[in-house]
Image (cartoon, coloured by chain):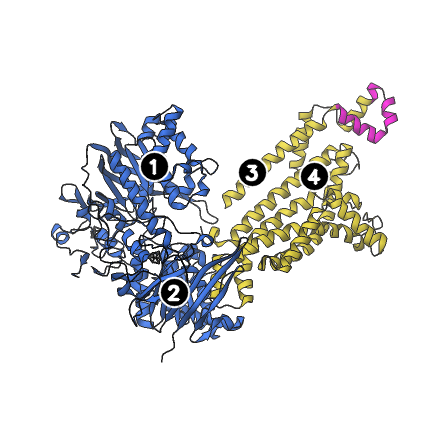
Chain colours: A blue, B yellow
Amino acid sequence: MEIPVLECRNLSISYYTRQGEVPAVVDFNLRLMPGEAHGIVGESGCGKSTVALAIMNYMGRNGAIVGGEILFEGRDMRTMSAEELRQIRGAKIAMVYQEPMASLNPSMKIAEQLAEVPMYHEGIGEAEALRRAEKMLVQVRLPDPQRIMNSYPHQISGGQQQRVVIAMALLSNPRLLLLDEPTTALDVTVEAGIVDLIKEIARTTGTSLIYISHNLGLILETCTRLTVMYSGEAVESGDIHAVFDEMRHPYTRGLFNSIPLPGADKNSRPLVAIRGQLPLPHARPAGCYFAPRCDHFAAGVCDHRPLPMRAVAEGASHAVRCARFAEIDWAAATLPHTPREKVLAGELVLSVEELTKHYTVESSGAFLVGARRTVKANEQISFAAREAETVAIVGESGCGKSTFAKVLMGLEDATSGRVQLGDLDLANLPVQSRNERTIARLQMIFQNPFDTLNPSHTVGAQISRVIRKFGVERDPEKVEARLNQLLDIIKLPREFAHRRPRQLSGGQKQRIGIARAFAGDPKVVIADEPVSALDVSVQAAVTGLLMDIQRDNRTTLLFISHDLSVVRYLADRVVVMYLGRIMEKGSTEEIFAPPYHPYTEALLAAVPIADTSVRKRRIVLSGEIPSPSNPPKGCPFNTRCLYMMAGTCDAIPPPQREFAAGHVIACHLPRETLLAMEPVISIAPA
Amino acid sequence: MLKLIASRLLQMLLIMVVVSLLLFLIFDSDKFKKQIAVAELGGFAVSALSEQDYEAWLEKKGLNVAFYERYAKWASGVAHGNLGRSFEKNEPVLSLVAERLTNTGILAFWVFALMIPLSLGLGIVAGMKEGSKRDRVVSFVAVFTTSLPEIATAIIVTVVFALGLRWVPANSSMVNGWDWRQLVLPVMTLVLYDFGYVARMTRASMAEVMTSQYIRTAVLKGLPYRRVIMRHALRNALIAPFTIIVLQLNWLLSGVVVVEVFFQYAGFGKLLLDAALFGDVYVIQAATLVAVCVAVVSQIISDVGYTLLNPRIRFG
Ligand code: SF4
Ligand code: SF4
């Protein structure tokens, strides 16, 4: 019989803190055969990264394996000496980390960081090691490997750094590659390139993979088997298709219901969030850890242990940790839909015309006097938003979406152009000279609720202040009433008014952020990546809430995001930006169906989708996003575009082609070519 | 970078002008003039002096002209390399300051020569494994020696090594010519006082580096521990202590008054103190200029060094 590359048997890992022993992972089992790719998926705090570090036997001073064993090629790693471990690390088991920049040594050149791997593991000479390193950089498809070898980590982009880390991991042909959220810090089109590379590695080298991610779509793209973790234990595991198509654990089901898959729609098939929140490790319930959040909880069955993993059928490799999986009627348990009416958009509320924002930055060379450069953060942005409408602004880093939000808020002056809110031109009205009413009419929800709440005041006081300041209510009793009403709307208990921000979870803070933004009855709310810092199940709850309030108040929502799945789910209209310019704009249906702008097409193809019935066309962009301080001439997308026509695209700015009223694509491609594009996403008949 | 250095130097000139003006203004008061007279002629003689004779004395010393005239004269002298004469010692200030600076320089050299390896070594050993026994011992010693005031350390080492064990002399005035044995106690006192601070900074910096993700990467690459420490950790960990060490130059110039006076060591700090007590304005001026100069230059060295050590800034 073939020996598994890695086997975890009843593995338990604890951390020792001042409060005592905190079990981080309990009773974890995994069997990884040669050439297999196994995904571990779960939300933050579920213990998935702890498993990876335990496999590497690197748990810091206060972590320890308290039970079970980890066998690497049949040998128990816990009994290995430090020297034996060293010989395995980096040679037979290699790891790729979430933050490529932080995982590379800032003061060593890439060449040395790569070359030392074979030098120390195989004892080869430096010249030979450098040659191998450079060859590996070519294999991970880095352009100009010579230059990269001679660079320090901060001199190359995030995507390139991650390729370097992958090259480093592959240099000594490992038997097992651990990938811990390898693309979470990267833009989607860059992520797509890395995922493509990882798949190729798995195919060509026969290396086994463990891919850790919170993103079910990525796991589906890269793995053949998966384990779903919740609160420190595996709750479901099996073949990827079995789990994705016939999930048998209420938590897995809940996860799938809360991510926006192509079929979801805010009106006909709204997302369903998992209620409640993850229990803290020392406050886990006695029986099933998921019990307080589970719709199928049954007293007497679910509230005691042991609760082992059980195969769903005799001999099946698909197993779940649920006492009632066999009794639950899974077909009936699908989504309790409550379809809602589509909201009709009203009057024009906000119109932006040819808005341009340039910065000058001084680039400081080492010993030279800095040269001035212009960053064109926004170039001639035009669009309009109506009452009760959601307009999404989509793009990757450097596309200028956050600068745009700042200009709207009056935190930055526009270089030229007009922003009309009602009858007011805001383009050059800095926030200091806006009156209270204007500020109240335009509010913002930030990505990171932690940064915008004052840690020393109760959240109630902070919201009340906004209510008074914007003159919604002045009378203390009425302020209080309004505060309570807001807390009810954001579905937090009224006692929460007395809490301070640090006593709240991330999702609760973001709810407070929403309450504060809506406290002054705004006409327009700008939400800058409001849910991207939150876990998926919480994301669904927060987006749902945001949409409910917007619907009730007929607010205009500008939703700034990099996540096309969320955008497709909740936006009415979409503006796609790249390097400060609008590439395409139109209604959501128009954006997600041909004709596409070539960038939109690539963006759509890059988003991983957690649905086995979805088929995507493979479009992988090469290269990186250029710097906005030095954008390419002509069409800004020409350095990566697969349709790029030399002589035209790299010289002349593309024309705006209108395909339907309001659907505009900025591209040189002839109309017919654009119209002839195939859909990127298709749903295979089941 | 050049721009930075230039602006720092300009800043230095400005400080020099302002400080020297201020000092002149302070020492121009009648009280200080009288004090010089008392110090030179004796208290009794001065009180017996008639108004006229006092005026004559002032004239002889060049103290009777308006202060801005004196300042202008002094400033142009400085520009030509003439720092004036000391009232107290009746010597050219230049040679006096130069001699004392050399003495302090020798002291500083030995303090650095011992303190740098000691504190960096201990700091690194401690920071390598935060919370280990070694770390706790080093941290305790470092806190202890630093928290003792210099004067207490000076007394302790004198009692133990000079009076008790009689290994070295207690007095470092070197009246009978240069003697390295007289240097031992002042150096020891300063090293004891200072190494703890630098060692703790080094420890903190090293401990931070050891928890960084790139050290984790280095360990999980399977590099030998030695290589992880020597090649991956050290360079990054030494950036912060380097700047601190350079800034210690400053402290060694003027912060060592207590030690120099205690051991009667004829150094720069003692010169400054004597001059201040005497009201020896030209010496004070010259010493202040030197101190400002050293402060700014060490700041520049530390900035430039920081940039050179840190590729992230070097190739920004
Ligand atoms: S064991 Fe009970 S509470 Fe736990 S997931 Fe299954 S049905 Fe829900
Ligand atoms: S204009 Fe040219 S480079 Fe730009 S998107 Fe169209 S085809 Fe591509």
Q: Is residue B35 magenta?
A: yes
Q: Is residue A455 above or below residue B227?
A: above
Q: Is residue A523 magenta?
A: no
The answer to which of marks 4 and 3 sits earlier in the sequence is 3
Contact between labelled residues 3 and 2, with CB atoms less than 8 Å apart? no
Contact between labelled residues 2 and 1, with CB atoms less than 8 Å apart? no
Instruction: Residue A126: tell me if it is visible.
Output: no
Q: What number is the disc on residue B291?
A: none
Where's residue B84, x and y in %? 72, 35
Instruction: Residue B272: tell me if it is visible.
Output: yes
Q: Secondary structure at mark 3?
A: helix
Do dots 1 and 2 share one subunit? yes
Tag 3 residue: B10
Identify the magenta region: B30-53
Q: CA distance from mark 1 to mark 2?
A: 40 Å
Q: Is mark 4 within 8 Å of ligand 2?
A: no
Label 2 or label 3, whichever lies nearer to me, is: 2
Where's residue A97, x and y in %? 41, 60
Contact between labelled residues 3 and 4, with CB atoms less than 8 Å apart? no
Q: Amino acid at mark 4?
A: Ala
Say which chain tag 3 marks. Answer: B
The residue at the far bottom in this view is A1
The residue at the far front in this view is A300
Q: How many C-alpha atoms fall within 10 Å of the one at disc 3: few (<14), some, or many (≥20)?
A: few
Tag 2 residue: A308
Q: Amino acid at mark 1?
A: Asp
Label 4 or label 2, whichever lies nearer to me, is: 2
Q: CA distance from mark 2 to mark 3?
A: 75 Å
Say which chain tag 1 marks. Answer: A
Write the residue at 29% across / 58% down.
Answer: A217
